[in-house]
Image (tube, helix red, strand yellow):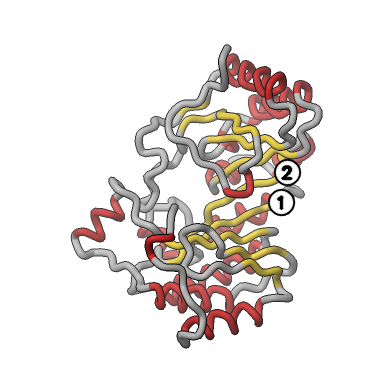
Amino acid sequence: MDGMHYEGFIIRPPSEADSILLQVTLGCSHNKCTFCGTYKEKRFNIKDDATIDADIDYAAKNLQFLRRVFLIDGDALIIPQKRLERILSRIREKMPRVQRVGTYANAKGILGKTDEELATLRNLGLEIVYYGLESGDAQVLKDVRKGHTPERMIEAGRKIRAAGMKLSVMVILGIAGRQRSLEHARATGQALSAIDPNYVGVLTLMICPGTSLETQLEEGRFELLTPREMLEELREMLVNTNITRGLFFANHASNYLPLRLRMPADKDKAIQLLDSALNGETALKPEWMRAL
């Protein structure tokens, strides 16, 4: 065997750059979001045990220097509980030096597990979950076809925290377009406050080719925000975000003004920085430097 069995385009969070990427699912079980083009070419499937086992064996033999495993593609929590327990147990058995396993998750996958099942996964090494909230606004979630209400999205995030896992929540500036920009910002801040995650990752909307959001934009049914409006949205979101302890990142490559702050201590300072940018006193990142 000459490597891991990867299929198709693969993504992982920036913070998992030094992780073993173990592909346990193909694509995303939901795969309907209007803004996401990541898994459009893949039909969702759970990979067979033999392939997953072979990849774990390969990583155990060839990647002993790495201490983290990240489960890809879209949502490993959709895997039936016993199979997921088996995968985590095998990682622990074959790679005892691995200190943490992480995964992406969506509300459907999280809400499909009981509290006891999630606690079991945590005890088997699943320590961090990356969760795309995108927005806390009911209309925006409906428009982007996320598949859940804000209440259910909040419930899913709180379930992960209650299981003792670390939670990184991703939200997207500009996803409401111009019409609901500030409503989106306000409701998203309130949803983040209700979930109280360890990490918040703020991304700025970039239109992916071939998505239905691109079609809406071309047909004039969706309006992109200007860089200034993005900052106003970020400011409103931050004002409404009250998390007890955690890091708030707006330093993804897609963002116009990189921010990394410890909440709640740095919140006021960050709002002052945003105000100075809105007043033209702080330079923004030029468009050509932004990336997905």
Q: Nearer the viewer, residue 235 or 117?
A: 235
Q: Which residue is mark 1?
A: 166
Q: Residues within 10 Å of mark 2 (few under 14, many from 20)?
A: some
The percent position of residue 260, horizontal first and vertical second, equals 63, 66
> First in sequence: mark 2 or mark 1?
2
- Residue 87, percent from left and from top: 67, 25
Q: Which secondary structure, mark 2?
A: strand
Q: Secondary structure at mark 1?
A: strand
Query: From the viewer's perspective, is residue 97 above or below residue 176?
Result: above
Where is mark 2, residue-wise? 127
Question: Residues at badges 2 and 1 in contact (C-beta under 8 Å)?
Answer: yes
Q: Which mark is residue 80?
A: none
Examine the rendered structure and indicate whether residue 205 appears above or below residue 229.
Answer: above
Residue at the spot x=50%, y=85% of the render? 281
Residue 46, given in percent of the width and then of the height, sits at 52, 26
Going by the picture, which residue comes out furthest to the bottom? 279
Please state, as top left, top right, bottom left or bottom right, where the N terminus lies in the image.
Answer: top right
Kindly identify the amino acid type of the residue bearing the numbered disc 1: Lys
Q: Is residue 52 left or right of residue 65?
A: left
| Measured Cα–Cα span from mark 2 to mark 1 | 6 Å
Q: For residue 76, which quarter of the picture?
A: top right
Task: Name the foreground residue: 12 vs 64.
Answer: 64
Q: Relative to 290, is 241 on the left or the right?
A: right
Residue at the (60%, 37%) spot, across then down: 77
Q: Residue at x 61, y 41 (%)?
A: 103
